[in-house]
Structure formats: structure tokens, C-alpha cells
Image (cartoon, coloured by chain):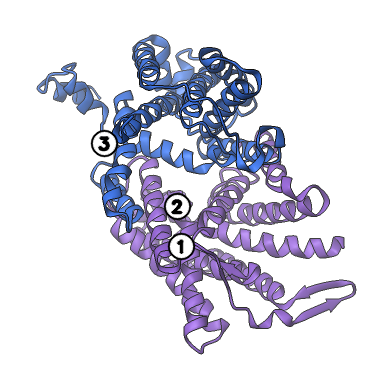
Amino acid sequence: MFAEQLVNGLVLGSVYALIAVGFALQFSILRIINLAYGETMMASAFVGYLVLTHTGLGHVAAALAAIAAGAATGLLLERFTLRYVRGGDELTPLMITIGVATLLTSVFSMMFGFEQRAFPRHYTGGILTIGEIQITLVQLSIFLIAIVTMVSLHLVLRRTRFGRAIRATADREHIAAAFGVNVRLIRVVAIGLSSGLGGLAGILIAENFGVVSPFIGTTFGLKALVVLIIGGAASLSGAVAGGLFLGMLEVMSSAYFLSEYRDAISYSILIIVLAIWPRGFVPNAVLR
Amino acid sequence: MGYWDHVILIAGINCILALGFYLTLLTGQLSAAHAAFVGSGSYIAGALAVKANFSFYPSIAAAAVLIGIAAAILGVILQRLSGMFFAIATLGFGEVLIVILKNNSYLGGALGLYGVPLRTDMIHVMGFLAVIVYLVIRLEGSRFGLSFRAIRNDPIAAASIGIDVARTRILSFVLGAIICGIGGALQVQYLSVVEPDDLGFYLTVSFLLFTIVGGRDIFLGSLVGATVFTVLPELLRITTYGRLTIFSIILVIIVIVRPQGMIDRLTALRWMKKIKPDSLKARFRKG
């Protein structure tokens, strides 16, 4: 029983971590809190849904389509809105992303209706049994995909020249530019990459819960923001720690306490954590 | 009462709420708890009216006092937080309250509190709004009010000239919360109903629209923002289909065209003839 809850917490936590990593990338490079991030995930999940239901292609194609859709949403957001308000108050881009979030929700609810839709999952039947733990193949693949994605992102950031340019931009944009880093390109890559991660997270969530609706965006966008903040706003390790922390907390509190109080418990603990560590688990980090 | 009377009354209440949020934002605190304070103000006044037969003014006073105490406690707990960390912690406070209210059958559970007597009318709303606007103007002009702005612009510099940053921040949080509590108490006695989800993130988004898009530098911005973003959705009702889509596109365009807010401080001061156009350059040169 406990081991199973542990697995559930790990799976949920790895998805949260994946969302928060994308968020952290945008926060540290573009200096924005992207409240349209949850809606980007929702839009990508719907694109994946369309690929699954209207073409004969499988889940891998759907995931790739979702990643592409997420990246495209992020790039359009940057090109047509965020680019015009650079360099000002950080609350201005926040308001723009709120507007875009509302836009995406309203457009998708006009196209797909207000009800949630069942997300087709072929291989839910597969169950892996290790000792007394049972893991569905969906859970296992979600966990593996999230881990592999985050590890490869970490390697790109730490081991490649381009990753070093990204970290330099996050640290001091002007100095990075003075050393010949193409900061504009880095910004575009950062939002494309992070929104692509958002698209992947969106379809993984749809696979995990088996439903997709125009209104999942706000819930997961807020959760990601919470994870980001617990972790320390601009650090990848903090985002992973925060994601696993929140995933575990939610699963454990609904398993061992009253499930209707789940959110109350996780948010109370959030307040306590912030009262003790006012700048998150990994304060003042720059994409480490 | 006609349809547009209704819209104007709601706009008046939203102006009161926006001023509460604005006052706290003036010290640079982005609070998601103010939405919860509005909802709690509604719950307190509503419950006292329904269960204990409180009359109009005592129910509002009780809401203001209780919200003030709650805000002071929360402010002290969160005094070391700033920026987005503060915003998220206050968001957490609202979410906790929502869950508690949803599971509290005495206060109506998830369906909310119904049947609150309808006692707020236009005169009450405009009266409270006028008093609050007057108090905000007086506060902003005072030394105490100027220290709010100083803290927002640079907390370290403010501390170095002897401003008690933590205490002033908590006070601005409490003052804003009390105004929001009063607004909530007025609102519930007009709408007659309050639900747990009224405390949530959506009201915070409205607050951001009112104050940030309206103009975060001067109280007029909040008033204009609250009025515009109450009336605009009503005007867009003529389209019925895709109302929210048009609204969000207009919002994005406004933010891109006026990133500093619809009413910024310079424009407002020029309107009020506090600055002559030719003295503007001199002010800029001084910084």
C-alpha cells in the first residue's frame, strides 16, 4: 500500500517537476512568470488528442505533435506579444500572459465544448508487478520520459557550449551579450524549448488522468508556479525537488488523511515551507 | 433597478475592492490573499446577517475588524517574504480557506451561503467609495503614504532613512485587507450569495486587471481599471459568441500599447493640473 502510494507520488511529482523545469527556464531567461503556460499544456494535449482520434498514428506521434504545438504556442507568444514589452516592469508580461491564457481557454472551449473528454489510452491494460508493487505501463513510461527529458536538459545546460550560453544569459544578460552570446536567439530558444516541455507535460498529464478539458490549464499552471516557488524560482534542481515534494505531498495527504482536505494540507505546508525558507529550497540560484 | 444601475453598482464595489488591492500593492506586495479577504468579508457579514440577525452597518464593521485581525496575523507570519514568494504564499492562504469553507456545512458547504438579506443600495456603495477614495488620497499625500512608495521603489534605501519596512508593509497589507473586507461585506448584501470559489484565483486575476492594467502608480488607475473591466464585458454581451475571446484580445492590445497602465502618474497629475506641461521636463531631469 505504502509502496504503491510512493510510486504514485513519484509519477505525479516527476510530471510536476517537468512542468516546473520549463517554467524555471522561462523565468530565468525571459524574466517572466508565464501564466499562459498551463494553457499551452492544455492546447498541446488537445493537439495530441486530435492526432490520436483523427489519424491512424499512435501515441508517439501524438506526443511529438503535442511537443511541436507547445513550442509553436510559445514562439508565437514571444513573437507577437512579449517582444513588445521587454525591459519594463515584470508585471506587464504577467498581464499579457493572463490575456493569452484567457484567449486560449476561450478558443478551445468554443472548439471542443465545456465538458471534459476521455483521452484514448490503448495500453492501460499493461501492468508491471515488482514484488507487491503494481505499476501501469502508462505510469512507468511517464516517469521514464520525464526523467530522461530532465536529465538530458541538465546535460545540455552543463556540458555543451550552447548550454553555457543559456546559463550565462540567465546570470547576467548584458555581460553574456558583451561576450558575443546571441541573447535574442537564446530567448527564442528558451521559450520554444520550455513551451515544448510544457507540451510534453500536457500530453503526459492527459495520459495519466485519461481526460482532457479546456480548463485543466489553470489548475496545472498554478501547481507549476507553486512548485517553481517552493524550489527557489530559477533553479532546475529546486524545480525537481519542489515537484517531487508536491507530488508526494498530494498523494500521501489524500491517501492517509481526509482526501477532501488534500489541497488544504498541501497549501498549508507550502506556507510553512515558505515561512521557514523565504526564498525557496535553492535560493538565488541561476539555472543550476 | 435598471440593468445599467446594476452594472454601475457592481463597478462601484469593484472600485472599492481595487483600492484595497492597490493600497497593498503600493508597498510592492502582490497579494493573492486579498481575494480571500473579499470572500471572507462576504462570509462574515453574510453569516452574521443570516444566523445572528445583525443589521447592515454592524455586519460590515464586524467583517472589517475580523478581516483586519486575520490580515495582521497573516502579515506577521509572511513578513520575510517578498515578490512572487509572497504572492504564492498568500495564494496558498486563499486555497486553504476555500477547502475549509467547502467542507463546512454550517456555512453552506460547496454550494455557498444563500439568502443573505438584500440591503446594499447605490447610496451605500457610492458613500463608502467616496469615503475610501478620500482616505486613500489623504494617506498617499502623508509621510506615512510616501513611505509606502519608498518601500516599493527600494526597500533597502527606505530602511536606511529610518522607515520600518516590515511594519509599514504589514500595515499596508492590513489596511488593504480591511478595505477589501468592507467591499466583500457590501457585495454579499447586494448579491445575496457567496460561494467558496469566490475566494479563489479568478478574483485575483480581476484585481490584477483593475490595478496593473488600470495603472499601478496612482489610485485613479485602479478606479479607471475597475470601471473599464466591469463595463467592458457587459458591452461585449452584444456579441454573445466569442465574448471572452474578444475581451482577451482587447486586454493584450491595451497592455502592449500602454505597458505602464492605462492611467500613469504623469498623465494623471497633468489632468489634475498639478504639473504644467513645461515643468515636466524639469522633473525628468531631476530624475
Mark 3, other Cα within 10 Å: few <14 / some 14–19 / many ≥20? many
Mark 2 or 3: in front is: 3
Mark 2 or 1: in front is: 1
**Label 3 sits on what residue type?**
Met
Location of mark 1 (residue): A40
Q: CA distance from mark 2 to mark 3?
A: 22 Å
Q: CA distance from mark 1 to mark 3?
A: 28 Å
Mark 1, other Cα within 10 Å: few <14 / some 14–19 / many ≥20? many
Name the residue: 31% across, 43% down.
B234
Locate residue B223 relative to residue A270 in the image: left or right. Answer: left
| Numbered circle sitting on residue A34 | 2
Location of mark 3 (residue): B262
Quarter placement of the C terminus of chain A = bottom right
C-beta proximity under 8 Å, tags 2 and 1: yes
Estimate the x, y position of residue A82 in percent, counting from the top left.
33, 53
**Label 2 sits on what residue type?**
Asn
Quadrant of the rendered image containing residue B52: top right
